Image (cartoon, grey):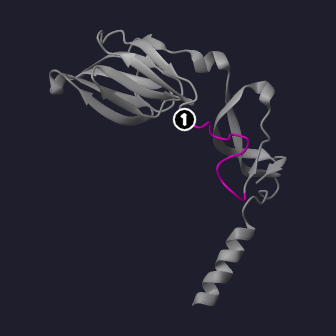
Amino acid sequence: MRRYSCFLLLLLAGCVGEPLPNTGEMLAYAPVYATQTQIDDIGITTPKPTTRAGKIYAYNQYLFQVEQAEGIHIIDNAAPREARKIGFLKVPFCTEIAIRGGYLYTNHVDDLVVFNLANIAGPQVVKRLEGAFPQIDQKHPPFSNTYFECPDPKKGIVVRWEQKLMKMPACRR
């Protein structure tokens, strides 16, 4: 049985990154870019629908829910059956949140940003620790043995990778 398992594993490994018949296309990773202007756009906006829900943090009568890579929903939960969004804290590329002593802490690319929650409807940035988190190497996708579109720094900063069908990508890792 072990011999057949090894054979099957080798067979499957050989199929990684093979072009689809008659199309020349293959599943590969494409970089998703952002400009520095998009990255630096932090602030409070009107509520928006939740599409990529992340972590939730409870603070007093409020809930703060991360919208993956976009920001943080501010939800008034004074009446849990009638909870309502009261604002959206736009923090591009945030994924984590913590609150302590009236301050909200979140990541913003590789920075730590601190907001004062004294005015819950309009949190203000009070501190930014640049480079608090190590920058993730985005020169290639975080996967091995895969093809990908070579990043082009002229298009912006690579913020993530998406898998899609493409014609013979030039890079491989």
Q: Amino acid at mark 1?
A: Phe
From the top left corner, tell me how far across and down residue 20 is, in percent. 77, 57
Residue drawn 72% across the image and 49% down it: 28
* Residue 78, image quadrant: top left
Residue drawn 33% across the image and 21% down it: 103
Residue drawn 77% across the image and 60% down it: 18
From the top left corner, tell me how far across and down residue 86 is, in percent. 31, 14
In the rendered image, which residue does mark 1 sit on? 133
Residue 140 seen anywhere in this rendered image of the structure: yes
From the top left corner, tell me how far across and down residue 25 is, in percent. 78, 50
Say what secondary structure mark 1 lies in.
Answer: loop
What stretch of residues is rendered in magenta?
Answer: 133-145
* Label 1 Cα crowd, 10 Å radius (few <14 / some 14-19 / many 20+): few
Q: Nearer the viewer, residue 115 or 132?
A: 132
Q: Quadrant of the C terminus?
A: bottom right
Residue drawn 83% across the image and 52% down it: 24
Report if residue 139 lies within the magenta region: yes
What secondary structure is the stretch in magenta mostly built from? loop
Q: Nearer the viewer, residue 5 or 138?
A: 138
Residue 168 seen anywhere in this rendered image of the structure: no
